Amino acid sequence: MRKILMLIFILPFVSFSAVGIPFLKPSLLNLKDDLEDAKRDGKYLFIMFHQEGCPFCDKMRKVTFQDKAVQEYFSKHFYMVEIDIRGANEVVDVDGKKMTERQFAHKYGVRLTPVFMFFDQKGNVVAKVPGYIEPKDFLLIGRYIVEGHYRDTNLVKFIKENKK
């Protein structure tokens, strides 16, 4: 019963353009709780910063997020939460501080969309990637996080060395 009530409350916050993205986490924008959920489930949390009318955000949803390999890998290893860089909804950051979506985006230096920001399981930002990303490259970014390469090499170098 509690889950049904939660879904009724959350549904208005879920973007209809996000239908069909299995790793999109229904969220009340409490990233501290979302991070705890991810840790509990053995996953990583990442944010997709977006805004209405962003053609590259739409392309991510229609192309990259619909790729079967991306869906399988990211469903297994990640939860994604969407943040509107112009939004007024309250966000609780991983450190527990409250602010609007707009303030949250500003705090992390996000001005354009899309931007993907990945957290380690302690809540540290370990990668921030702007722009549209092809499915093969998005999978490499996922591996970079999951396999812990962020600890000893930068993302650009990792992608160059692993691109086939």
Image (spheres, rainbow, N blue to C red):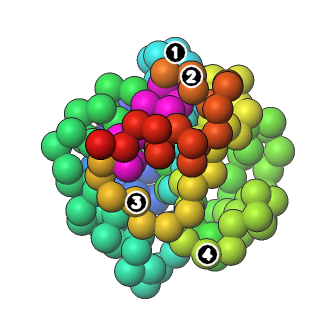
Among the two numbered marks 3 and 4 on one chain, the one whose residue lies closer to the N terminus = 4
Are the residues tagged 2 and 1 within 8 Å (C-beta)? Answer: no
Identity, as a three-letter code, of the amino acid under mark 1: Arg
Quadrant hosting residue 97: top right
Whole-number angstrom distance, CA of label 2 to CA of label 1: 18 Å
> Residue at 70% across / 40% down in the picture?
125
Among the two numbered marks 1 and 4 on one chain, the one whose residue lies closer to the N terminus = 1
> Residue at 44% across / 80% down in the picture?
54
Q: Which residues are magenta?
A: 137-146
Q: Which mark is residue 112?
A: 4
Element carrying mark 4: loop
> Residue at 37% across / 31% down in the picture?
3
Q: Which residue is mark 3?
A: 133
Q: Position of residue 6 (x, y in %)?
A: 43, 39
Q: Residues within 10 Å of mark 1 (few under 14, many from 20)?
A: few
Q: Main secondary structure of the magenta part?
A: helix
Q: Which mark is residue 148?
A: 2
